[in-house]
Image: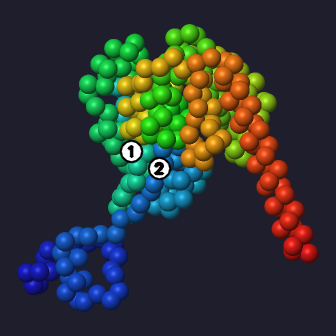
Amino acid sequence: MSPNSATLKAGEYDFPSPISPLGVLAKLQQGQRRLNRITIPEGWTRWDIAREMMQVPQFGLTTEAQALELMNNVSLINDLDPEAKNLEGYLFPDTYEFSPETTGDQLIEMMVKRFREVWKPDWVERARSLGYSPRQMVTTASIIETEAKLDEERALVASVIYNRLEKDIPLAVDSSIVYASKLEGKWRYDGKVYKSDIERRSPYNTRIYAGLPPGPVASPGESSLKAALFPATSDYLYYVRNPARDDGAHNFYSNGAEFETGVAALRRWERERDAEEARKKRENANSGQ
């Protein structure tokens, strides 16, 4: 056996083409193995992550229930959130690279480890100074993640949440209503919130019940965690999408009358948009005849 052969590292490799024999040898010696990759976007829920993990053959997950079961290992987060019943909110959104030998539960551990790397030790005390537990901070951050499209608006959205909580006004957040429906297996996955969803008697239904939902409703990113911990100071109680912009920006309001005016403007814009889309479809259909 040659001296070099003893340093070769076993595993699966991807080699560019063309590549010289010396290039192959260098990769084998350096152990530059092929890695698999999975991306978890901000705002995904356990169900979203479960479906994505089912697409990775090496995990051997044939049902959503099997994938969700991997997310029940609350021992990974028990010191920070002793009330956790699952890992919702703590599966940090990021792109993960892993070897072909990595198991599903090991990937879950990687996600929680990444969350703990982002979560600063002094944030526990910061949460308490605001009058909330770390779990409530992560819950607030998960709502911010699903509501704010622009980083510069996250702290303002946080201020609206805290202002409404202080006044005991229901948050009326659609993402929590969707979460309630997912918990009961009633969500239709068509992007529409139905009357039955809005009327569902669940503590996650923030249209019916004031206060924060019992736990996180999505995976918040770092910017949403920071917004929850360091909210803007405002007297805003409402926000609605700004129809004059196409980047997800909102208009913020401190009273109901202004808010209703903003809602009316948005509804008018939606009707005009829908009418324009219908007109284009008719034109396309006629041109195809």
**Residue 100 sits above or below residue 18 on the image:** above
Q: Name which quarter of the figure residue 269 lies in.
A: top right
Q: Residue at x 76, y 49 (%)?
A: 273
Left or right for 131, reference 185: left
Q: Nearer the viewer, residue 250 or 178?
A: 250
Please provide percent x and percent y for residue 188. Answer: 73, 43
Amino acid bearing label 2: Ile
Residue positioned most to the left: 3
Examine the rendering and report whether any part of residue 112 can be seen.
Answer: yes
Q: Residue at x 36, y 58 (%)?
A: 97
Amino acid bearing label 1: Met
Q: Name which quarter of the figure residue 102 lies in.
A: bottom left
Please tell me the numbered disc located at residue 111.
Answer: 1
On the image, numbered disc 2 is attached to which residue? 40
Label 2, label 1: how far apart the Cα atoms are: 9 Å
Q: Are marks 2 and 1 in contact (CB under 8 Å)?
A: yes
Which quarter of the figure is the C terminus placed in?
bottom right
Q: Residue at x 71, y 24 (%)?
A: 260
